[in-house]
Image: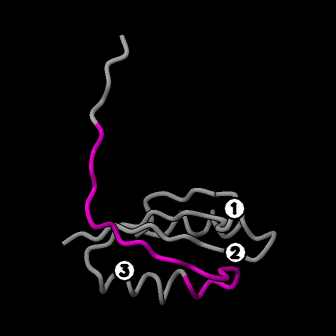
Amino acid sequence: MAVFAYVLVTLNPGSEKNILQKVSHFEEVTKVSMTYGEYDALVQVNTESLDQLNEFLTDTLRVLPDIFQTATLIVAKTHASKTRNTS
């Protein structure tokens, strides 16, 4: 069963460019967005299981020195939008 999650990330100041570039190359990461506000980034993650998600978060992401804090949102259900024809 595939597991999709969004990880909200707070970084140490000044580390955004380098750390987000590094995170974007991890196999489990499908998208990284730099954000303004309470969190510095939104990381979209796709894994094969909850165990694999746990391993990624614990052994890969949270061990990076400039990651200060994370909050993980596991997707329960996705609703796809219909494509609109604007012509």
Inter-mark Cα distance, 1 to 3: 25 Å
Q: Secondary structure at mark 3?
A: helix
Name the residue rendered at 62%, 83% in the picture.
Answer: 64
The answer to which quarter of the image holds residue 38 is bottom right
Foreground label between 1 and 3:
1
User: Which residue sits furthest front?
Assistant: 38
| Of pointers 1 and 3, the one earlier in the residue sequence | 1
Q: Which residue is mark 2?
A: 11
Q: Position of residue 16 (x, y in %)?
A: 72, 66
The answer to which quarter of the image holds residue 28 is bottom left
Q: Position of residue 42 (x, y in %)?
A: 55, 63
| Of pointers 3 and 2, the one earlier in the residue sequence | 2
Q: Position of residue 63 (x, y in %)?
A: 58, 88
Question: Range of the magenta residues?
Answer: 62-81
Name the residue rendered at 52%, 77% in the picture.
Answer: 71
Q: Inspect the magenta stretch and tell me whether residue 60 lies in it.
A: no
Q: Which residue is mark 3?
A: 53
